[in-house]
Image (spheres, coloured by chain):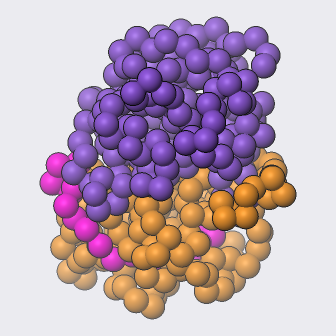
Chain colours: A orange, B purple
């Protein structure tokens, strides 16, 4: 892998900056001496403070159990530099392989959770389960982001947005309409 | 407005094609003889069949009550052609104005719900409330998409993805990794 991005602390109340545009993310978890990584595209910001993110993590994923039992995970934001790794992780089962080793990713110690950060990603959001009321019915976890780390550059990372059928939309140009927003809507 | 896009029926089990990449959407509703439109960026696909979408609709929005009382809404997908209207709708209160008239949008009759489609949008997803278990705690509605309409062209519409602070990321190039996906993961 290339040199790992240098990161700074980031306010957890502002994770919508990275998650609201809908990128594919990598979810890392740890339980009982093992780690795992899965791809996830079904997630939404739910609240600024506490910083809540809702995520659909299918019961068929090995990660589902690890997250439920440990109560924790890390949501990692990959860029297009990791496209083939994102696809590879989606194709493989964490029961069979150590995904960090297999894909040459760098685990880094998190500050507030036991699950490892993926150092190669642009941003890492340490999460704890906040509410599991809808896990049984919809595999829908509500996490609180308790710590956020974001790479210093680039300001607008090139993220992957899945559309199904093996096709990703890549983030494009940035447009600002800041001057047209009512100040309390920003 | 420009000529309205010509639409075809679209399988509801496949709405992830348009919603999973995380676009800003416009939610239209109707109740008690009035209609309303709001912008929404906090949503996620939850299931293919039934076609479920989870949406955070803040209690502060006039639409929240209208949707709760009518049990229905339409999720409409705008493209960058509507950027300033998207911002304008976010800035205004449905209590004060008729947003269709004010923004020159074209209401169209839906097939399965009373709320109007926004004809000017690239796609329209008719929704009914499927589960309101998390509405009181998180303003989180789970809708079932009961009918979908999608413009015939373009195949990949230029969508808006909000990052906060008045800044949108616009959808960019498309990349396919179809050949690298395990067939059952497509």
Residue at far left of view: A136
The N terminus of chain A, quarter of image? bottom right
Residue found 40% across the figure and 89% down from its top: A112
Residue B47 is situated, as x and y percent measured from the top left of the image, at 31, 38
In the depicted structure, whether residue B144 falls above or below residue A55: above
- Confirm whether the magenta stretch covers residue B148: no
Residue at far right of view: A179
- Confirm whether the magenta stretch covers residue A128: yes
Tally the marks.
0
Residue found 58% across the figure and 81% down from its top: A11
**Side (left or right) of B90 relative to A24:** right
Residue B141 is situated, as x and y percent measured from the top left of the image, at 34, 46
In the depicted structure, whether residue B158 falls above or below residue A181: above
Q: Is residue B172 visible?
A: no
The C terminus of chain A, quarter of image? bottom right
Q: What stretch is highlighted in magenta?
A: A118-138
């Amino acid at each position: 892998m290339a040199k790992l991005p240098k990161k700074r602390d980031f306010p957890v109340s502002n994770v919508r900056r990275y998650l609201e545009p809908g990128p594919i993310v990598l979810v890392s978890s740890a339980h009982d001496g093992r780690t795992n990584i899965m791809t996830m595209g079904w997630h939404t910001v739910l609240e600024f403070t506490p910083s809540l993110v809702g995520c659909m993590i299918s019961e068929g994923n090995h990660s589902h159990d690890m997250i439920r039992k440990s109560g924790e995970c890390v949501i990692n934001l990959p860029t297009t530099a990791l496209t083939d790794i994102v696809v590879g992780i989606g194709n493989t089962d964490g029961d069979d392989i150590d995904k960090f080793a297999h894909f040459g990713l760098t685990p880094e110690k998190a500050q507030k959770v036991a699950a490892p950060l993926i150092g190669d990603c642009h941003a890492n959001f340490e999460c704890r389960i906040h509410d599991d009321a809808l896990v049984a019915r919809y595999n829908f976890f509500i996490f609180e982001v308790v710590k956020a780390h974001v790479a210093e550059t680039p300001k607008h990372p090139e993220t992957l947005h899945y559309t199904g059928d093996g096709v990703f939309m890549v983030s494009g140009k940035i447009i600002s309409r800041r001057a047209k927003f009512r100040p309390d809507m920003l």
